[in-house]
Image (tube, coloured by chain):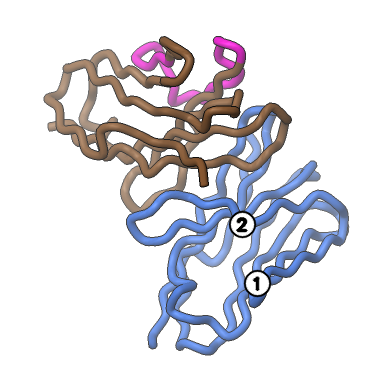
Chain colours: A blue, B brown
Amino acid sequence: GQQVMQIPQYQHVQEGEDFTTYCNSSTTLSNIQWYKQRPGGHPVFLIQLVKSGEVKKQKRLTFQFGEAKKNSSLHITATQTTDVGTYFCAQNQGAQKLVFGQGTRLTINP
Amino acid sequence: EPEVTQTPSHQVTQMGQEVILRCVPISNHLYFYWYRQILGQKVEFLVSFYNNEISEKSEIFDDQFSVERPDGSNFTLKIRSTKLEDSAMYFCASSTDRENEKLFFGSGTQLSVL
């Protein structure tokens, strides 16, 4: 099936620094979802983007969907230790088949 | 807030044995899923289930795997003859009756095959 490539695989930042993870697809996406998984936890839904060029914000998190709907990004401003975890983008490949990217593991130095 | 519950949280089994992982999806959800995650790796889709039948399945979901909704609340994943490489965290998830909806995940069952 189609692959959504997510980069970087790992990111280590100092607390207070910004963080960005990117998802890229070779095909046009109908929508994209983002999930966060805390260490030892389960994926938790963050947001869904549907429209071309869409930008959504949740406090310090900013989500973007590319104009061509082939890429997406998640940006965290001024990271805090509570942001630690793995961030996954996910795309629908079929109505009931949500496929996850490889994830970006974020670690933070307090 | 309603949540997906999974039991057991940990399961240890011998290679070749059958295991059944259990899930109780959120009560008004109609779509159910199983995913697995090998330690440190990505969350892999196994199967989706709607209206008492499989909607989609991945190439991982071979004849050794089966799913069932035995009653109005439980959703199970059976692995008939476990292999070492089946060791992983297995997550159940559910979603509402609309397509492309967000998934709610359970806390997972850590399966260890010895």
Query: If the image is split into quadrants, where does the C terminus of chain B sit?
Result: top left
Q: Is residue B49 magenta?
A: no
- Residue A100 point in image, percent of width and height: 56, 45
Crowding near the residue tagged with mark 1, few <14, some 14–19, many ≥20 C-alpha atoms within 10 Å: some
For this rendering, which residue is in front, A53 or B101? Answer: B101
Describe residue A57's horizontal placement relative to residue B72 as left or right.
right
Q: Looking at the image, is mark 1 or mark 2 earlier in the sequence?
A: 2
Residue drawn at x 24%, y 15% is: B81
Name the spot of residue B23 as percent of width and height, x first: 39, 28
Residue contact at pointers 1 and 2, CB within 8 angstroms: yes
**Residue A46 — which label?**
2
Type of amino acid at the residue the image marks with label 2: Leu
Q: Chain of mark 1?
A: A
Q: Amino acid at mark 1?
A: Leu
Asked if the stretch drawn in magenta spans residue B54, the answer is: yes
Q: Is residue A92 above or below residue A26?
A: above
Q: Is residue A59 shown left or right of residue A41? A: right
